[in-house]
Amino acid sequence: MMRLSSDSLASLPDDVQRPAYDRAAVRAGVVHLGIGAFHRAHQAAIFEDALNAGDLRWGVIAASLRSPGVRDQMQPQDGLYTMLVRDGRADRAQVIGAVRQVIVAPEEPQALLAALASPDTHIVTLTVTEKGYKLDPATGALMEDDPQVAADLLSLHAPQTAPGYLVAALALRKEAGLAPFTAISCDNLPHNGQRLRGAVLALARRHDPALAEWIEAQGAFPETMVDRIVPATTADDIAGLAERLGVEDQAMVKTEPFLQWVIQDWFCGPRPAFGAGVQVTAAVAPWEEAKLRLLNGAHSGIAYLGGLAGIEYVHDVLALPEARFFVEALWDEAETTLTQPPELDVAAYRRALMARFDNPTLRHRTRQIAMDGSQKLPQRLLATIAHRLEAGQGVDALSLAVAAWIRWQAGVDDRGLGHEVDDPLAHPIAEALSDAHDSRARVDAILGLGAIVPSPLAQHDAWKETLTQWLSVLETHGARAALARFAG
């Protein structure tokens, strides 16, 4: 079958939205690090809106910092791909043309540096996952013992990390007399802008203190909160879309109608006239906190409990009344820790979240959410637990979620079927658990991992007891029984 491309656009069905601008006239004002499905369904779609509105400065040069997979999907398609928006009743297909080029950084480091240092580039966005910042999850400090960080500390000629590329490119811009770009982290890290800024400044100081001073004085690293559910694309998705469009799209993404991007009002150069779904505000932290502790915290609990129970999709987990009860209870606990922005109606937000989780057409896999748990739990669950314990409040639902993550590390579900523990700390976690022969010892082993669990929390005896009790129930009776016991 013919691939989606510039030549095949005209053959698409009439109900498919196409780029409404001349792609040849677009300038690349954005460089994105970490192109994957989320970027293509979120930031790229927002820059597409700007292009469709007539501002042709906001094309995207995207980069993969690791593999050529997305480049190889998109290059034969002239950078075009379909965003399929599913709401449970109908699908809406839109062809996105914002991405002008995909660079595989390990193959072409100088090409990526040239794009970052270009006078056309005003904004750099990042979706490199929590582990891509090379920051210690507990302290936020640059992980200098990481081999890639160590290499960037020695030389930035061919950077190996996201902070390394930013520092090397900012040095080129300073040398050329250009202003810095605005660097926008779009990953689920608390205070993500400050963390990115800290990583960049730490690396810059080691190479050139004057460069670090220039970045500190003139650069911009706004805090952000991003929200859109983007499940992984399957072969069935590609086949179904090909039947509908009459062309094959290997780079398609599927997502929900909901889209939100809250950005701190801190830019050091031009920005688009952002449209629907984007809110520029003075304070992002309350929005970020609500999303991490409500949406992401619930997602992690659903992923590990559902995954252990052998349930593949989020909406199927929530078909269990006891699972819905658990999610509402987790939200009850988390809500008390929020600094609620005046524009956020938490009750309405919770109802909207449940409706989004219930969307059966997304087919959001529990195992996809379960990835990289050691990097996610500190901000999604552990910070909430610490807040409530300090206030003398209970943490029963939150503790069940953490216990389910610990149980997940065994690499086998309640049916005895194996699964991969896909986590950057999988090896040290497995080592810590190797000599732990009962639930209490396994909790002690996990709480001893300072890179994941802050010391004050690890030393909280009452919480340790709650965690041990739930882990014992999960190991003895399974996730469904644990949920039933929790629901009482």
Image (tube, rainbow, N blue to C red):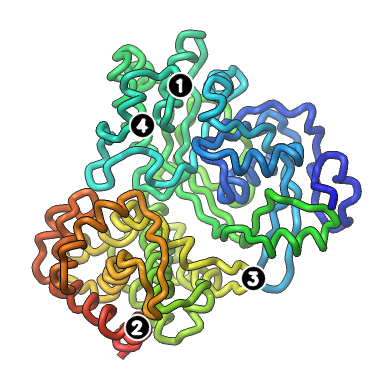
Residue 93 vs residue 354, the one in the foreground:
93
State which mark lies toward you, 3 or 1. 1
State which mark lies toward you, 1 or 2. 1
Mark with earlier residue (3, 4): 4
Q: How crowded is mark 2: few (under 14 residues within 10 Å), some or many (20 or more)?
A: many
The residue under label 3 is which amino acid type?
A: Thr
Q: In which quarter of the image is residue 408?
A: bottom left
Please report the residue visible at 55 percent of the width from the left and 57 percent of the height from the top.
Answer: 228
Q: Mark 4 points at which residue?
A: 148
Relative to 334, say whether 278 is above or below: above
Q: Where in the figure is residue 440, as x and y percent of width and height?
A: 14, 72
Mark with earlier residue (4, 1): 4
- The Cα atoms of the two marked residues, 4 and 1, are separated by 11 Å
Residue 340 vs residue 171, the one in the foreground:
171
Label 4: which secondary element: helix
Say which mark, if any, is on residue 158. Answer: 1
- The Cα atoms of the two marked residues, 1 and 2, are separated by 50 Å
Mark with earlier residue (2, 3): 3
Q: Name the residue under label 3.
A: 361
- The Cα atoms of the two marked residues, 4 and 2, are separated by 41 Å
Mark with earlier residue (3, 1): 1
Q: Quadrant of the C terminus?
A: bottom left
The residue under label 4 is which amino acid type?
A: Gln
Figure label count: 4
Q: Residues within 10 Å of mark 1 (few under 14, many from 20)?
A: some
Q: In which quarter of the image is residue 85?
A: bottom right
Q: Is residue 442 visible?
A: yes
Please report the residue visible at 27 percent of the width from the left and 78 percent of the height from the top.
Answer: 475
Mark with earlier residue (1, 2): 1
Q: Where in the figure is residue 122, as x and y percent of width and height?
A: 56, 26
Please report the residue visible at 52 percent of the width from the left and 71 percent of the height from the top.
Answer: 357
